[in-house]
Amino acid sequence: MKVFYSPRYIASEESFDTVAKSGWIAESLASSPIDGVQIAMPAPITPADLEGAHDPGYIDALRTGRPRVVAESQGLTWDPGLWTSISASTGGVVAAALTALEEGSAGSLSSGLHHARRDRGSGFCSVNGLAVAAEAALREGASTVAILDLDAHCGGGTASIISTDPRITQLDVSVSSFDSYTDTGNSTLWLVDHADLYLGRVAHSLEQLKSLQPDLLLYNAGMDPHEDCSIGGLRGITSDILAERERLVFESCARESLPVAFVLAGGYIGSRLTADELVDLHRLTIAAGAVAARTRPSGPPAPA
């Protein structure tokens, strides 16, 4: 299973976890490889590649830093390396999506950045890689794409961008109301307020996928529901529960022969969660994806 990463992902001087942690995870995979995982280098996207999901003026602000209020609308400090980071990490999301269409599964150490809107950033998210990758997959021949968002927070940015495209569907299971939205025709949000209900709601969303029968699933694999994560965590959601969640997601995709591309989402160090512990949480996603990749039939399902 290919997992995309480039040192350009962390080219920005910004040290916030959303930008920095891909480097920590890459170092972990180099020192403690996961069986079946092949690190691959993605090509960076160009400004034109983003125009289906984002306004040209916003893209130009991210590239140049002007106007600064727009370039920093996601809450990160702009520097010349930010565009390098954005273009590389979003390229990784697109590469994972297109590789999954061809090979059945893939991933990227970049995040989905689901809070970014068409004309601005939000919640530490500059470019909505989920929307960009979904559109790239549709251009490459997919008829429908589903997004499964299991970040702690709601994917309101994604919902706003894809709202006019019925070919893209979002299923969103969240434990925090940040960036919440009213269900649209193609985005459905479930807010869970008790850990005992969490895995059941995830299982229900996977059942929904069966009826949708998309050509590709983009999986935004957040670890911030963990009870020790100070930004979004829900008491009672443990590492074991998140490991079971990953098993459920990837085994369901393998069983249904559904091509899946995963990206990292939330997960933040703090007083109760160290960088090493956060890396171990994100490794749960990669390990579960690699196990499922070994059990699925070679390549995506044949057309009906």
Image (cartoon, rainbow, N blue to C red):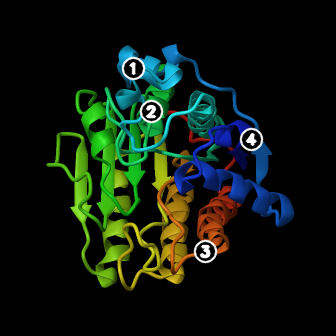
Q: Say which of marks 2 and 1 sits in front.
A: 1
Q: Nearer the viewer, residue 207 or 244?
A: 244
Q: What residue is shown at x 24% (from left), y 40% (from top)?
A: 186
Q: Position of residue 72 (x, y in %)?
A: 41, 35
Tag 4: residue type?
Answer: Pro
Dot 2 or dot 1: first in sequence order is 1
Q: Say which of marks 1 and 3 sits in front.
A: 3
For residue 205, side relative to residue 51 (left or right): left
Dot 3 or dot 4: first in sequence order is 4
Q: Give the Cα separation between the discs numbered 2 and 1.
A: 10 Å
Query: Does any portion of residue 168 appear in the rendered image?
Result: yes
Tag 3: residue type?
Answer: Thr
Query: Does any portion of residue 36 appear in the rendered image?
Result: no
Q: Residue 134 carries which label?
A: 2
Instruction: Give the residue number, with chain letter if any, for mark 4.
Output: 7
In the displayed structure, 59 sits above or below 187; it is above
In the displayed structure, 75 sits above or below 268; it is above
Badge 2 crowding class, 10 Å Cα cut-off, few under 14, some 14 to 19, many 20 or more, is many
Dot 4 or dot 1: first in sequence order is 4
